[in-house]
Image (spheres, rainbow, N blue to C red):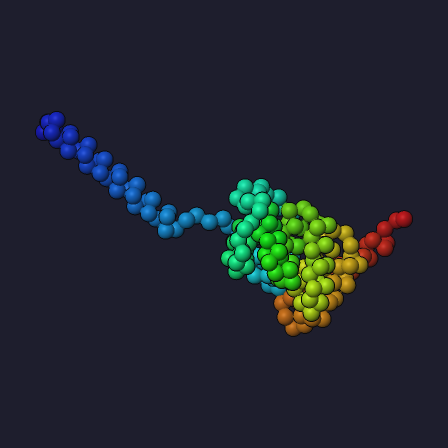
């Protein structure tokens, strides 16, 4: 077996160093071009909002606000909607809330944003705040089936089956022959069952 001289050892070390750097560079480039993204739960048919607005798509989730400043100065609603949608898709609901509120400062009658803000508030545990926003949205545009569907869902989940039935009935009628109408019918069954159980409960 031949004996390696110091010069050969030096060449081997240089090669290993170069090889290691090449692997690092290729790996780093891959992750820059293919960043790891959070997994978003798949939504069933009849979504109140695609891709992340279906009322029954998730249970309330709390998350920390660590990336959105207290006062948002952006004045382009389209950019704000993109940011809010990204946060919602990543289930960072608490961070999405101030962005939605900023959009409503610029466009107070944006029913879609009121719908999504209501969902975000509900998912962070603020059921009362969610209902307030959703009721306002339903008053803003009583012909929008999605806002009624979301209002009905949140009312059902927060223990008001009577209001849930009223809102879901509106969603069913306005969204007839659509996924929203189909989901409203399904939730109406749950609301009627909940109201019946409440009526049959011992006084």
Image position, residue 202 (x, y; %): 88, 49
Where does the image place residue 33, in percent across and percent down from the top left? 36, 51
Say which residue appears at 65% left-offset and 66% top-offset: 180
State left or right for residue 149 relative to residue 83. right
> Image quadrant of residue 103?
bottom right
- Most foreground residue, 5 or 74: 74
Please determine whether, in this image, residue 123 is positioned above or below residue 148. Answer: above
Outermost residue to the right: 203
Give x and y (percent) for residue 195: 81, 57
Number of numbered discs overlaid on the protein picture: 0
Side of 82 relative to 8 (left or right) = right
Residue closest to the eye, 18 or 144 = 144
Residue plotted at (54% across, 46% down): 68
The answer to whether any part of residue 185 appears in the image is: no
* Residue at x 62%, y 57% (from the top left corner): 104
Q: Image point 57% across, 52% down: which residue? A: 99
Residue 61, given in percent of the width and then of the height, sits at 62, 46
In depth, the one of 77 and 42 nearer the eye is 77
Task: Say which quadrant the N terminus sits in.
Answer: top left
Is residue 69 in sight in this rendering? Answer: yes
């Amino acid at each position: 077996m031949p004996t390696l001289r110091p010069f050969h050892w030096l060449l081997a070390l240089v090669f290993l160093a170069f090889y290691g750097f090449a692997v690092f560079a290729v790996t780093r480039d891959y992750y820059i071009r293919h960043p790891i993204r959070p997994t978003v739960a798949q939504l069933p048919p009849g979504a109140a909002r695609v891709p992340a607005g279906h009322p029954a798509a998730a249970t309330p989730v709390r998350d920390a606000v660590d990336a959105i400043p207290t006062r948002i100065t952006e004045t382009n609603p389209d950019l704000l909607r993109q940011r809010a949608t990204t946060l919602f898709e990543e289930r960072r609901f608490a961070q999405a809330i101030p962005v939605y509120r900023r959009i409503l400062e610029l466009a107070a009658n944006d029913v879609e944003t009121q719908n999504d803000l209501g969902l975000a508030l509900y998912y962070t545990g603020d059921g009362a705040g969610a209902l307030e926003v959703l009721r306002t949205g339903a008053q803003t545009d009583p012909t929008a089936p999605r806002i009624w569907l979301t209002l009905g869902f949140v009312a059902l989940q927060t223990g008001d089956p009577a209001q849930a039935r009223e809102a879901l009935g509106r969603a069913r009628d306005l969204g007839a022959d659509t996924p929203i109408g189909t989901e409203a019918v399904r939730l109406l069954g749950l609301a009627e069952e909940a109201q019946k159980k409440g009526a049959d409960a011992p006084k």
